[in-house]
Image (cartoon, helix red, strand yellow):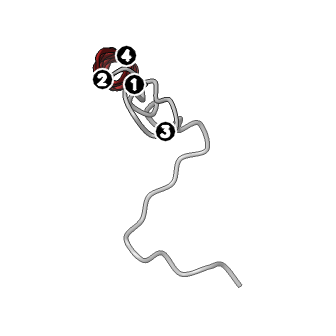
Amino acid sequence: MPEPDHGHHHSEGHIPPPAPPRQRRVLGFRPLHVVLGALILVLILVLYLLLTARAGY
């Protein structure tokens, strides 16, 4: 008994369209955002070290 056709046409030679290219991610973030976040953290660390060195610790 053939399967009923529910309006879906499947051709044997049909190739699905390629998936859209995904953006590169580093732990879920875009690489530019990772670099900017690292620069901000380094800036905060340098400011902290300058302030503590000036205070005489």
**CA separation, marks 1 and 2?**
32 Å
Give the residue pinned by disc 3. Answer: 16
Query: Residue 53: which disc?
Result: 4
Q: Residue, x 46% and y 29% (percent of image)? A: 25
Report crowding for label 3: few under 14, some 14 to 19, many 20 or more residues within 10 A (C-alpha): few
Q: Residue, x 61% and y 44% (percent of image)? A: 12
**Camera-nearest residue between 26 and 5:** 26
Query: Residue 34: which disc?
Result: 1
Where is residue 38 drawn, in percent x and y? 40, 21
Q: Tell me the mark number nearer the camera, choosing from 4 and 1.
A: 4
**Camera-nearest residue between 20 and 53:** 53
**CA separation, marks 4 and 3?**
63 Å
Q: Residue, x 35% and y 24% (percent of image)? A: 52
Q: Are marks 4 and 1 in contact (CB under 8 Å)?
A: no
Where is residue 57 drawn, in percent x and y? 43, 25
**CA separation, marks 3 and 2?**
66 Å
**Camera-nearest residue between 15 and 5:** 15
Q: Earlier in the sequence, mark 4 or mark 3?
A: 3
Q: Amino acid at mark 4?
A: Ala
Give the residue pinned by disc 2. Answer: 55
Q: Quadrant of residue 56?
A: top left
Q: Are marks 4 and 2 in contact (CB under 8 Å)?
A: yes
Q: Earlier in the sequence, mark 1 or mark 2?
A: 1
Q: Are marks 3 and 2 in contact (CB under 8 Å)?
A: no
Report crowding for label 1: few under 14, some 14 to 19, many 20 or more residues within 10 A (C-alpha): some
Q: Amino acid at mark 3?
A: Pro
Up the image or down, 2 lies above or below 54; here it is below
User: Disc 1 on helix, strand or loop?
Assistant: helix
Q: Amino acid at mark 2?
A: Ala
Q: Are marks 4 and 3 in contact (CB under 8 Å)?
A: no
